[in-house]
Image: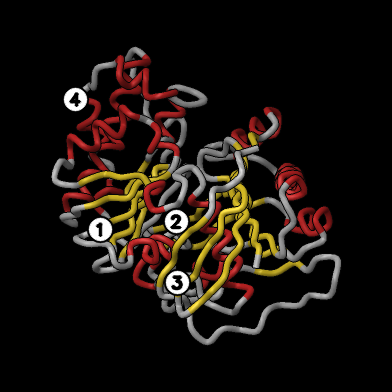
Amino acid sequence: MRVLGLISGTSHDGIDSALVDWSLDGGVLTGALVELGERPYPPELRARITAALPPGRVDFGEVCALDTLIGQAFAEVAAGAPAADLVCSHGQTLFHWVEDGRVRGTLQLGQPAWIAERTGVPVVSDVRARDVAAGGQGAPLVSYLDLLLMAGLPGRTGALNLGGIANLTVRDPAIAYDTGPACALIDAAAPPYDRDGKLGAAGTVDENLLRELLAEPFYRLEPPKSTGKELFTPGYVKAALPQADLVATLTALTAETVAAEVRRHRLDTVIVSGGGARNPTLMGMLRARASQAEFVTSDELGVPADGKEAIAFSLFGWLTAHGLPATVPSCTGATGARVLGTITPGSDPLTLPEPLAEAPVAIRFSGSPAPRR
């Protein structure tokens, strides 16, 4: 079954896509990577998304417009991809409502009807809400893929995603949670981002500011926990520092908060993905602060580091179509595993595969995906 996964993450810079042809044999799920894509948002749409994110305030007219415009942008990407049997769209998170450590709701915009209308195929969407309704954090959902990837690897292993927010999945025991900012604050200090970590490398870490930032109460919360730009807003850090020093300090903040969790779980190997994996300054600081662990990119397991989340959403679409849960309760904090999402039919009558009685126990990837569009 060919499933197209679509997502725009907390960096809200564009839409990542992954078309994967899934097949199950003897409990092993094989994903043949057909194509990976990355399409920047049109500048005017990204500006409207940025203005709507906390601490911005918008009315329902703008919410309606963004739901439509984001949905149309996702539909444009889907229409340009090779033919798929199903699309699974994350959309764009605009708000993640957390009170006293509990997620009360989560809002992703990007009306799936535009995708279904443009492509004619069914669309799985609103993927996080069911886990939240079951008492979970709705994140990090990628932990399901992480645990399959880590199955059978030696030693104490974790999977780290460095997007706008950093999240860590630990195999034994199976837990996952957001550790704090990854690139969100760095990007805000060096828009659109610190290319190749050059600013961070050129600056000097302000140790006093770093100590102040590390006092953030979120870091002391026990997992499961999740966060977003509702807390780590672009104005989160107010410091009269040269830009390079500020970027260096924020890079050190990400490195230290992640490394603290790597040390806490005594990890031997950490599989890294996300845009931050391509920042050599961040990765150098992280290796220095958690020197007992070996950091490798997910590319070495056949999963391109820049495309892992889109691949994960392709996987979630396959699982939903086959009636299988895509959550790990010990990772999200939900009361049980849940089948995720809602389904918008395509142009034909909705026909789903026969439900599967057993979920895959391992995963592997094959093929060299077509170049990014």
Indicate left or right for 269 with 28 as reference.
Answer: left
Dot 1: element? strand
Numbered badge on residue 157:
1
The earlier-in-sequence mark between 4 and 3 is: 3
The earlier-in-sequence mark between 3 and 2 is: 2
**Nearer to the camera, 104 or 27:** 27
The earlier-in-sequence mark between 2 and 4 is: 2
Residue of label 3: 135
Q: Amino acid at mark 3?
A: Gly
As measured in the structure, the alpha-carbon distance from the residue carrying label 4 to the one carrying label 3 is 38 Å
Q: Nearer the viewer, mark 1 or mark 3?
A: 1
Q: Amino acid at mark 2?
A: Val
Q: Amino acid at mark 4?
A: Glu
Sort mark 1 into few (<14), some (14-19) or many (20+) by Cα contacts within 10 Å. Answer: many
As measured in the structure, the alpha-carbon distance from the residue carrying label 2 to the one carrying label 4 is 30 Å
Quadrant location, the N terminus: bottom right
Q: Nearer the viewer, mark 4 or mark 1?
A: 1
Dot 2: element? strand
Dot 3: element? loop
Horizontal and vertical percent for residue 348?
85, 70
Please determine whether, in this image, residue 321 is positioned above or below residue 227: below
Quadrant location, the C terminus: top right
Residue of label 2: 98
Numbered badge on residue 345:
none
The earlier-in-sequence mark between 1 and 3 is: 3
Sort mark 4 into few (<14), some (14-19) or many (20+) by Cα contacts within 10 Å. Answer: few
Q: Nearer the viewer, mark 2 or mark 4?
A: 4
Please determine whether, in this image, residue 6 is positioned above or below residue 56: below
Residue at horizontal 52 percent and vertical 87 percent from the top: 357
Horizontal and vertical percent for residue 262?
22, 50
